[in-house]
Amino acid sequence: MTDEKSRHARDAQSKSDVNADVDSPGYRERVFEIVRRIPAGRVMTYGQLADILGEGYTARTVGFVMHSADESVPWQRVINSQGACSTGRVILPPDLQQRMLEAEGVHFDARGRCELARYRWTPEEFDGADDREDDSQPSLFGD
């Protein structure tokens, strides 16, 4: 039964990704409005943005939208939930995002991850909305 529930949840997630109008200017602008507010030297995650924006937004769709950001949007300040840059396969040179963040004062460890507890930024109006005791992110890599 658990497998069936998991499959249903994945299907629902996929449908919301497909049904989201990521190509509409209004959809993209809601993402960009928040990203423009991220201070230099701070970051947000794709999933964090999706949670704040609500229904119709997922980490995947936020990532898709970020590919269309122009120079007015500090796109480099949006990273993955592991505290790492995810643009290496999309942008040349592959370490551009990390170098841009390092120039702003964000420090990365040898694995290319920053400490989210230190660098994650949350808009004031959403700060404290998610009062988790454990702010660490689980690793997909078993470490």
Image (cartoon, helix red, strand yellow):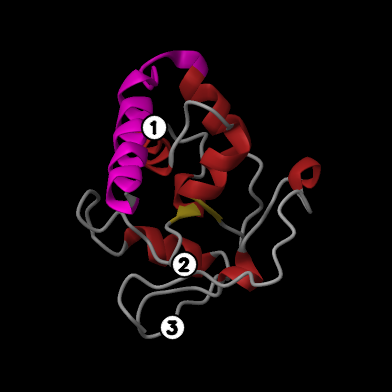
Q: Provide the residue designation for mark 2.
A: 83
Q: Nearer the viewer, residue 85 or 81?
A: 81
| 4 on left or right of 137 | left
Which quadrant of the figure has residue 61?
Answer: top left
Whole-number angstrom distance, CA of label 2 to CA of label 1: 19 Å
Q: Amino acid at mark 3?
A: Asp
Whole-number angstrom distance, CA of label 3 to CA of label 1: 27 Å
Q: Earlier in the sequence, mark 3 or mark 1?
A: 1
Q: Earlier in the sequence, mark 2 or mark 1?
A: 1
Q: Which mark is residue 39?
A: none
Numbered range of the magenta stretch: 2-26
Residue in view at x 36 percent, y 31 percent: 12
Label 3 crowd (10 A; few <14 / some 14-19 / many >=20): few
Q: Earlier in the sequence, mark 3 or mark 2?
A: 2
Q: Nearer the viewer, residue 137 or 75?
A: 137
Decide: is 1 above or below 113: above
Q: Amino acid at mark 1?
A: Val
Label 2 crowd (10 A; few <14 / some 14-19 / many >=20): many
Q: Amino acid at mark 2?
A: Gly
| 11 on left or right of 131 | left
Q: Is residue 76 magenta?
A: no
State whether the magenta stretch is mostly helix, strand or loop: helix
Helix, strand or loop at label 1? It is helix
